[in-house]
Amino acid sequence: MALANIRIVMVETSHPGNIGAAARAMMNMGLSDLCLVRPKDFPSAKATARASGACGILRAAKVCDDITQAIADCQIVVGASARDRSVAWPALSPRALAEKFRPQIETQRIAVVFGREHSGLSNDELDLCQYLLRIPCNPKFSSLNVGAAVQVVAYEFYQAAMAQHDATGTAPPASDGWPANLAPGDAVPAGAAEIESFFSHLQQALFDIGFFHATKSGPSLMRRLRRLFHKARLEQKEIHMLRGILSQMQIRLELQHRREAE
Protein backbone atom coordinates (compact mmCIF):
# COMPACT_ATOMS: atom_id res chain seq x y z
CA MET A 1 0.00 0.00 0.00
CA ALA A 2 1.31 3.45 -0.92
CA LEU A 3 0.04 5.27 2.15
CA ALA A 4 3.48 6.87 2.25
CA ASN A 5 2.11 9.05 -0.57
CA ILE A 6 -0.37 10.70 1.83
CA ARG A 7 1.10 13.81 3.47
CA ILE A 8 -0.51 15.42 6.50
CA VAL A 9 0.31 19.15 6.67
CA MET A 10 -0.41 21.07 9.89
CA VAL A 11 -0.22 24.86 9.73
CA GLU A 12 0.88 26.96 12.73
CA THR A 13 -0.34 24.44 15.28
CA SER A 14 -0.49 26.12 18.70
CA HIS A 15 -0.68 23.09 20.97
CA PRO A 16 2.11 20.52 20.64
CA GLY A 17 -0.21 17.86 22.04
CA ASN A 18 -2.25 18.12 18.85
CA ILE A 19 0.86 17.35 16.81
CA GLY A 20 1.48 14.27 18.93
CA ALA A 21 -2.15 13.18 18.61
CA ALA A 22 -1.94 13.56 14.82
CA ALA A 23 1.24 11.48 14.71
CA ARG A 24 -0.44 8.73 16.73
CA ALA A 25 -3.48 8.79 14.43
CA MET A 26 -1.22 8.56 11.38
CA MET A 27 0.72 5.59 12.75
CA ASN A 28 -2.55 3.81 13.63
CA MET A 29 -3.56 3.99 9.98
CA GLY A 30 -0.20 3.41 8.29
CA LEU A 31 0.58 7.01 7.29
CA SER A 32 4.07 8.38 7.92
CA ASP A 33 4.57 11.71 6.10
CA LEU A 34 3.99 14.61 8.52
CA CYS A 35 4.85 18.19 7.61
CA LEU A 36 4.59 21.11 10.06
CA VAL A 37 4.37 24.72 8.91
CA ARG A 38 5.68 27.15 11.54
CA PRO A 39 4.58 25.14 14.61
CA LYS A 40 4.48 27.22 17.79
CA ASP A 41 6.23 24.62 19.97
CA PHE A 42 8.11 21.76 18.32
CA PRO A 43 9.96 19.56 19.19
CA SER A 44 8.09 19.20 22.45
CA ALA A 45 7.81 16.71 25.29
CA LYS A 46 4.04 17.22 25.17
CA ALA A 47 3.95 16.14 21.54
CA THR A 48 6.06 13.08 22.34
CA ALA A 49 3.77 12.12 25.23
CA ARG A 50 0.61 12.40 23.13
CA ALA A 51 2.21 10.45 20.28
CA SER A 52 2.18 7.34 22.51
CA GLY A 53 4.84 5.43 20.61
CA ALA A 54 4.61 7.21 17.25
CA CYS A 55 7.82 9.08 18.00
CA GLY A 56 9.37 7.99 14.70
CA ILE A 57 6.82 10.08 12.81
CA LEU A 58 7.66 13.09 14.99
CA ARG A 59 11.40 12.64 14.45
CA ALA A 60 10.92 12.40 10.69
CA ALA A 61 8.47 15.32 10.51
CA LYS A 62 9.54 18.08 8.15
CA VAL A 63 9.26 21.66 9.42
CA CYS A 64 8.60 24.29 6.72
CA ASP A 65 8.39 28.07 6.58
CA ASP A 66 5.24 28.16 4.46
CA ILE A 67 2.61 25.98 2.82
CA THR A 68 4.08 26.29 -0.67
CA GLN A 69 7.24 24.60 0.57
CA ALA A 70 5.21 21.88 2.30
CA ILE A 71 3.18 20.96 -0.80
CA ALA A 72 5.73 21.68 -3.55
CA ASP A 73 6.09 18.05 -4.65
CA CYS A 74 2.41 17.09 -4.26
CA GLN A 75 0.10 16.53 -7.23
CA ILE A 76 -3.15 16.73 -5.24
CA VAL A 77 -3.69 19.29 -2.46
CA VAL A 78 -6.77 19.33 -0.21
CA GLY A 79 -7.46 21.96 2.45
CA ALA A 80 -9.60 21.24 5.51
CA SER A 81 -12.12 24.05 6.00
CA ALA A 82 -15.44 24.36 7.80
CA ARG A 83 -16.40 27.70 6.27
CA ASP A 84 -17.89 28.64 2.92
CA ARG A 85 -16.01 30.64 0.31
CA SER A 86 -17.20 33.54 -1.82
CA VAL A 87 -16.17 31.51 -4.88
CA ALA A 88 -17.60 27.99 -4.72
CA TRP A 89 -14.84 25.39 -4.42
CA PRO A 90 -15.20 21.61 -4.88
CA ALA A 91 -15.81 20.13 -1.40
CA LEU A 92 -15.43 16.50 -0.35
CA SER A 93 -16.03 14.52 2.82
CA PRO A 94 -13.11 12.35 4.05
CA ARG A 95 -14.76 9.23 2.62
CA ALA A 96 -15.50 10.88 -0.72
CA LEU A 97 -11.93 12.22 -0.83
CA ALA A 98 -10.39 8.79 -0.23
CA GLU A 99 -12.73 7.13 -2.74
CA LYS A 100 -12.17 9.78 -5.40
CA PHE A 101 -8.40 9.43 -5.27
CA ARG A 102 -8.19 5.74 -4.46
CA PRO A 103 -6.75 4.98 -7.94
CA GLN A 104 -4.08 7.67 -7.41
CA ILE A 105 -2.96 6.52 -3.96
CA GLU A 106 -0.30 4.31 -5.57
CA THR A 107 0.99 6.89 -8.03
CA GLN A 108 0.58 10.45 -6.75
CA ARG A 109 1.48 12.38 -3.61
CA ILE A 110 -1.61 13.76 -1.88
CA ALA A 111 -1.38 16.55 0.73
CA VAL A 112 -4.18 17.15 3.23
CA VAL A 113 -3.69 20.54 4.87
CA PHE A 114 -5.08 21.36 8.33
CA GLY A 115 -5.17 24.94 9.59
CA ARG A 116 -4.78 26.67 12.93
CA GLU A 117 -6.84 25.44 15.88
CA HIS A 118 -8.81 28.68 16.22
CA SER A 119 -8.86 30.24 12.76
CA GLY A 120 -8.20 27.46 10.24
CA LEU A 121 -6.68 28.30 6.86
CA SER A 122 -6.66 31.76 5.28
CA ASN A 123 -8.20 32.41 1.85
CA ASP A 124 -4.72 32.74 0.34
CA GLU A 125 -3.78 29.35 1.80
CA LEU A 126 -7.00 27.76 0.54
CA ASP A 127 -6.22 29.15 -2.93
CA LEU A 128 -3.32 26.69 -3.02
CA CYS A 129 -5.73 23.76 -2.61
CA GLN A 130 -7.62 22.06 -5.42
CA TYR A 131 -10.36 20.76 -3.12
CA LEU A 132 -11.88 21.55 0.26
CA LEU A 133 -12.30 18.90 2.92
CA ARG A 134 -15.46 19.01 5.02
CA ILE A 135 -15.96 16.54 7.88
CA PRO A 136 -19.69 15.99 8.48
CA CYS A 137 -20.56 16.34 12.16
CA ASN A 138 -23.18 17.67 14.57
CA PRO A 139 -24.07 21.19 13.29
CA LYS A 140 -24.73 22.26 16.88
CA PHE A 141 -21.16 21.33 17.87
CA SER A 142 -19.08 21.34 14.70
CA SER A 143 -15.70 22.31 16.16
CA LEU A 144 -13.49 19.24 15.71
CA ASN A 145 -10.08 18.88 17.35
CA VAL A 146 -7.35 18.80 14.71
CA GLY A 147 -5.95 15.50 16.03
CA ALA A 148 -9.40 13.94 15.73
CA ALA A 149 -9.78 15.36 12.23
CA VAL A 150 -6.48 13.77 11.18
CA GLN A 151 -7.69 10.46 12.63
CA VAL A 152 -10.89 10.56 10.53
CA VAL A 153 -9.01 11.36 7.32
CA ALA A 154 -6.27 8.80 7.97
CA TYR A 155 -8.87 6.09 8.62
CA GLU A 156 -10.66 6.74 5.33
CA PHE A 157 -7.41 6.68 3.35
CA TYR A 158 -6.41 3.45 5.08
CA GLN A 159 -9.72 1.84 4.13
CA ALA A 160 -9.41 3.08 0.54
CA ALA A 161 -5.84 1.82 0.23
CA MET A 162 -6.86 -1.60 1.59
CA ALA A 163 -9.70 -1.79 -0.93
CA GLN A 164 -7.39 -0.74 -3.77
CA HIS A 165 -4.80 -3.31 -2.76
CA ASP A 166 -7.39 -6.10 -2.49
CA ALA A 167 -8.94 -5.20 -5.84
CA THR A 168 -5.77 -4.85 -7.90
CA GLY A 169 -2.95 -6.50 -5.97
CA THR A 170 -0.80 -3.47 -6.78
CA ALA A 171 2.75 -3.35 -5.48
CA PRO A 172 4.27 -0.68 -3.23
CA PRO A 173 5.87 2.37 -4.87
CA ALA A 174 9.09 1.80 -6.80
CA SER A 175 12.24 2.39 -4.76
CA ASP A 176 13.75 4.65 -7.42
CA GLY A 177 11.19 7.35 -6.67
CA TRP A 178 9.20 6.92 -9.89
CA PRO A 179 5.56 6.28 -9.00
CA ALA A 180 4.49 2.64 -9.21
CA ASN A 181 2.26 1.80 -12.21
CA LEU A 182 3.44 4.95 -14.01
CA ALA A 183 6.01 4.42 -16.76
CA PRO A 184 8.44 7.23 -17.66
CA GLY A 185 6.61 7.76 -20.97
CA ASP A 186 3.23 8.26 -19.34
CA ALA A 187 1.62 11.62 -18.63
CA VAL A 188 3.02 13.01 -15.38
CA PRO A 189 0.68 15.12 -13.21
CA ALA A 190 1.99 18.60 -12.44
CA GLY A 191 3.15 19.18 -8.88
CA ALA A 192 1.97 22.03 -6.66
CA ALA A 193 5.17 24.03 -7.19
CA GLU A 194 4.79 23.84 -10.99
CA ILE A 195 1.12 24.81 -10.76
CA GLU A 196 1.88 27.80 -8.53
CA SER A 197 4.60 28.96 -10.94
CA PHE A 198 2.04 28.79 -13.74
CA PHE A 199 -0.51 30.81 -11.72
CA SER A 200 2.12 33.47 -10.98
CA HIS A 201 3.02 33.61 -14.68
CA LEU A 202 -0.66 33.79 -15.68
CA GLN A 203 -1.35 36.61 -13.22
CA GLN A 204 1.63 38.61 -14.46
CA ALA A 205 0.65 38.09 -18.11
CA LEU A 206 -2.91 39.25 -17.42
CA PHE A 207 -1.53 42.36 -15.75
CA ASP A 208 0.83 42.94 -18.69
CA ILE A 209 -1.99 42.91 -21.24
CA GLY A 210 -4.16 45.15 -19.05
CA PHE A 211 -6.87 42.58 -18.43
CA PHE A 212 -6.97 42.99 -14.66
CA HIS A 213 -6.93 46.78 -14.99
CA ALA A 214 -9.96 46.61 -17.29
CA THR A 215 -12.00 44.34 -15.00
CA LYS A 216 -10.94 45.88 -11.66
CA SER A 217 -11.56 42.49 -10.04
CA GLY A 218 -8.12 40.89 -10.16
CA PRO A 219 -8.16 38.87 -6.90
CA SER A 220 -11.68 37.51 -7.41
CA LEU A 221 -11.08 36.69 -11.06
CA MET A 222 -7.74 35.04 -10.29
CA ARG A 223 -9.49 32.85 -7.70
CA ARG A 224 -12.00 31.75 -10.35
CA LEU A 225 -9.19 31.01 -12.80
CA ARG A 226 -7.49 28.90 -10.15
CA ARG A 227 -10.66 26.89 -9.73
CA LEU A 228 -10.95 26.45 -13.51
CA PHE A 229 -7.42 25.11 -13.93
CA HIS A 230 -7.57 23.00 -10.77
CA LYS A 231 -10.54 21.14 -12.26
CA ALA A 232 -8.42 20.33 -15.32
CA ARG A 233 -5.83 18.43 -13.21
CA LEU A 234 -2.97 19.74 -15.36
CA GLU A 235 -0.07 17.56 -16.45
CA GLN A 236 3.56 18.74 -16.63
CA LYS A 237 3.49 18.94 -20.44
CA GLU A 238 0.31 21.01 -20.32
CA ILE A 239 1.88 23.42 -17.83
CA HIS A 240 4.87 23.85 -20.15
CA MET A 241 2.56 24.44 -23.13
CA LEU A 242 0.47 27.05 -21.29
CA ARG A 243 3.53 28.89 -19.99
CA GLY A 244 4.98 28.88 -23.51
CA ILE A 245 1.80 30.59 -24.75
CA LEU A 246 2.00 33.18 -21.97
CA SER A 247 5.67 33.86 -22.73
CA GLN A 248 4.92 34.44 -26.41
CA MET A 249 2.13 36.86 -25.45
CA GLN A 250 4.55 38.81 -23.29
CA ILE A 251 7.28 38.82 -25.95
CA ARG A 252 4.86 40.13 -28.60
CA LEU A 253 3.61 42.79 -26.20
CA GLU A 254 7.16 43.92 -25.45
CA LEU A 255 7.95 44.13 -29.20
CA GLN A 256 4.83 46.20 -29.77
CA HIS A 257 5.82 48.59 -26.98
CA ARG A 258 9.30 48.97 -28.53
CA ARG A 259 7.87 49.76 -31.96
CA GLU A 260 5.52 52.31 -30.48
CA ALA A 261 8.41 53.98 -28.65
CA GLU A 262 10.51 54.34 -31.82
Image: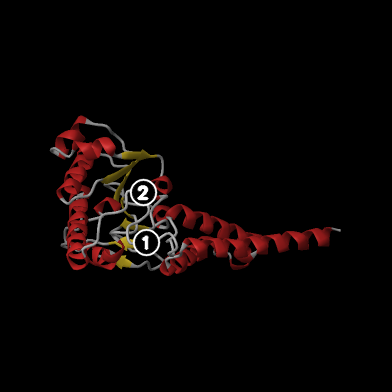
- Disc 1 target residue: 182
Which residue shows up at 80% across the image and 58% down it? 258
Q: Position of residue 123 (x, y in %)?
A: 40, 56
Say the numbered circle drawn on residue 176. Answer: 2
Which residue shows up at 29% across the image and 39% down it? 61
| Residue 209 in view in this figure | no
Query: Of label 2 and label 1, which has the lower sequence position?
Result: 2
Three-letter residue code for mark 2:
Asp
User: Relative to 51, does residue 176 appear above or below in the rendering?
Assistant: below
Q: Quarter holding the C terminus?
A: bottom right
- Quadrant of the image occupied by residue 207: bottom right
User: Relative to 212, does residue 111 appear above or below in the rendering?
Assistant: above
Say the numbered circle drawn on residue 85. Answer: none
Q: Position of residue 131 (x, y in %)?
A: 35, 63
* In the foreground, 119 or 158: 158
- Quadrant of the image occupied by residue 179: bottom left
- Looking at this view, name the residue that lies furthest to the right: 262
Give left or right: position of 241 versus 8: right
| Residue 116 in view in this figure | yes
Q: Quarter holding the N terminus?
A: bottom left
Instruction: Characterize the local packing of mark 1: few (<14), some (14-19) or many (20 or more) Cα atoms within 10 angstroms.
Output: some
Give left or right: position of 77 versus 244: left
Which residue shows up at 20% across the image and 30% down it? 45
Which residue shows up at 28% across the image and 33% down it? 41
Three-letter residue code for mark 1:
Leu
User: Relative to 235, does residue 24 appear above or below in the rendering?
Assistant: above
Q: Position of residue 240 (x, y in %)?
A: 55, 61
Give left or right: position of 178 versus 51: right
Marks 2,1: beta carbons within 8 A: no
User: Relative to 222, does residue 24 appear above or below in the rendering?
Assistant: above
- Looking at this view, name the residue that lies furthest to the top: 45
Q: CA distance from mark 2 to mark 1?
A: 12 Å
